[in-house]
Amino acid sequence: MAHLLPLYRRSPAFLKSDLALLRRYIMKNPYRESFGEIPFGSTPISEIESMAAAFRWKGRFLELGSGLGRACFWLAKGRKMQVRGVDQSWAFIERAQSVAAGDPSIEFQLGDLLDADFTWPDVIYFYSTAFSDEIIEALVPKLSQLRPGAQVITISAPLKSPDLYLFKRLKVRFPWGATFAYCHKRLA
């Protein structure tokens, strides 16, 4: 929690959202609520901020597999981005929507990440470590819909796509260990 104090000081609105999320998950285990077959892992907010700074995120952010929605809340409240989270878990989406209610900069959608609007974002975050090779392979052709210059961030492995080039990588830390975040850009 101490690693979040600078972010809470920087954005009291994020602190308020984070506490509201915490209240909704007291005595409810998100790992159990992800239906067992849907992978759940949470990216530390300090690492989201590290990636946002290193890769110079701005504009519209789409998180594929938004889980609790914390990354979306940080980027909307702390970085003033327009954000959209997509997840297959109704429990996650319902709680995130209740916290975001009335905030036009945050939107959560229940659905398959492959059905997301790929023409909308400037930045996509995909915690690819948690998804099967089949889902990753199905995602790659969808990325051709991105506007030139849009970023796609993956964790642990870069994507292989004729529409993207690997722009930069950054060492990031998760509770399970250190790895790399890969920033790809859509070719013009």
Image (cartoon, helix red, strand yellow):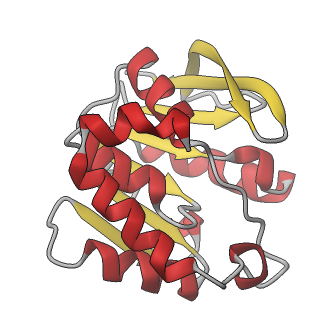
Residue beneath the point at 56% across and 44% down: 1
**In the rendered image, the vertical position of residue 97 relative to residue 150, given as above or below:** below
Q: Nearer the viewer, residue 120 or 124?
A: 124
Q: Percent from the top left, x then y, of residue 141? A: 61, 47
Q: Nearer the viewer, residue 160 or 175?
A: 175
Spot the residue most to the top: 168
**In the rendered image, the vertical position of residue 98 relative to residue 52, given as above or below:** below
Q: Percent from the top left, x then y, of residue 179? A: 78, 25
Numbered disc total: 0
Residue beneath the point at 45% across and 15% down: 54
Q: Percent from the top left, x then y, of residue 138? A: 70, 56
Residue beneath the point at 37% across and 21% down: 188
Quadrant of residue 182 within the rendered picture: top right
Q: Nearer the viewer, residue 158 or 77?
A: 77
Quadrant of residue 7 within the rendered picture: top left
Residue beneath the point at 55% across and 24% down: 184
| Left or right position of 120 against 90 | left
| Left or right position of 64 against 18 | right
